Image: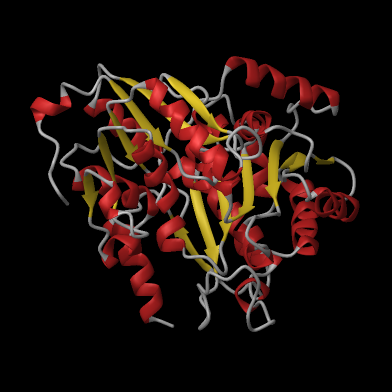
Amino acid sequence: MKSKLTHSNLKNIRHLLIRSTNWIGDAIMTTPAVRAIRKNFPGAEISILAKSWVAPVFKNSPHADRVLIYDEGGRHCSLTGKLRLATDLKRCRFDAVILLQNAFEAALITFLAGIPVRIGFDSDARKLLLTHAVRRIPEIRKIHQTGYYLEILRGAGLMTDGQDLHLTVSHEDQNRAREILVSYGISQKDGLLVGINPGATFGTAKRWFPERYAALCKRLQKTVASDILIFGGPGEEALGQQICEEAGKRCVNLCGRTTLCEAMALIERCQLFVTNDSGLMHIAAALDIPQIAIFGSTDHVTTAPVSSMSRIVRVPTSCSPCLRPECPEKHHRCMNEITVDMVESAVYDHLSCVRQQCLTDEKFPCILISTLRVRDSRQIQGAKRPLCIPTQSVGTRLMRLTKLSAEKR
């Protein structure tokens, strides 16, 4: 790194740009860094440059003053568009930029924009484009991603502010969520509203099987669920429809039918969320929704949901995490060995842990107390016990847990 920021030149930064990451889950995991940046620059005007599908994550953030859209599909498309973006940023007269996004392009655009202070990891051969290049040592890539982004700030001599996620849903979006539920006849008066997220970007290796999600939905409908919402993005409509048809009534397919803002507000209304490793998983974690996250091919050490209300279900296999979009061995063992019984057991165990909160938190209807008694997880016969990890801490504690599990393989 060429130099660290000092108190004297911190005071000179009045207009600061943050370059966001390009995926929803990654963007959620940068929110501790964004909060810390605000604490380091309390008097600065902070803007976040984000692509359109990520921008809603920061739409209502108290830690940023405005969100600038990187219009990759329009104004900023192609090489000419990148130069146009650099010109757009130059007109904003930023004093500094912090690059949470690692690509060479991110550094090049801000270099061409003439932003005098440029902070980021020295990855992707961009060291010469940065004024404060933070060395990305191999150990940094092995820690949880919330900590990974905070290392950029530490390397530049800036303060951090913990690893808690942050996400704000606007009153407008909350009202819209209520309207959507009413349109489907969902009143939330006689059980839990359960969210299911069976999809995931980056290929099928991250996905638990739709028929197993459908079987889980059937079981939850008999015990804790009043209604079930199937979440998913464009292109996942058929996946949602398959689950709804197999699960039966009281199951609503929302795949491809909501904006990200609407999806966030609807997840906020859920009292249980069951999901693959995905962007919506991190949204549920940021909103502290009781959650079961199913992990297979991805690394639970680096991308676990950061919330005391989240639990991970995984079965360690010799080939996971492979981080591949499709199973290279064609057996998909990391997901195939996670049974419906395992996930159902994890649901009841986890809901039992939040049972006391039901007595004082209006978010959880009192029916949860009685429905949990109907089907205790210990009554599930023949259920092989998965590795079910609480994710309250993603620092040393979580790393110790996962190292111990690896040693037992």
Q: Nearer the viewer, residue 276 or 194?
A: 276
Q: In the image, is 400 to the left or to the right of 317?
A: left
In the rendered view, how is the structure colored?
secondary structure
Q: Between residue 55 and residue 231, name the one nearer to us.
A: 55
Q: Quadrant of residue 13?
A: top left
| Most foreground residue, 225 or 94 | 94
Question: Which residue is found at the position 34% from the left and 62% from the top?
Answer: 141
Residue 367 image point, x, y percent: 67, 34
Is 269 left or right of 59, judged from the image as shown?
Answer: right
For residue 198, say whether it is visible.
yes
The relative height of residue 382 versus residue 107 in the rendered view (above or below) is below
Q: Where does the image place residue 350, in percent across and percent down from the top left?
A: 54, 51
Q: Is residue 104 above or below residue 91?
A: below
| Residue at 60%, 53% in the rendered image | 348
Q: In the displayed image of the protein, which residue is found farthest to the front?
A: 80
Which residue: 61% across, 40% down?
A: 77
The C terminus - image quarter: bottom left
Q: Is residue 164 visible?
A: no
Residue 261, horizontal then vertical, whole percent: 63, 29
- Where 344 falls versus 360 (above or below)? below
**Image position, residue 132 (x, y; %):** 21, 44
The mark tally for this picture is 0
Side of 265 where 398 appears, left or right: left
Vertically, is 258 above or below 276? above
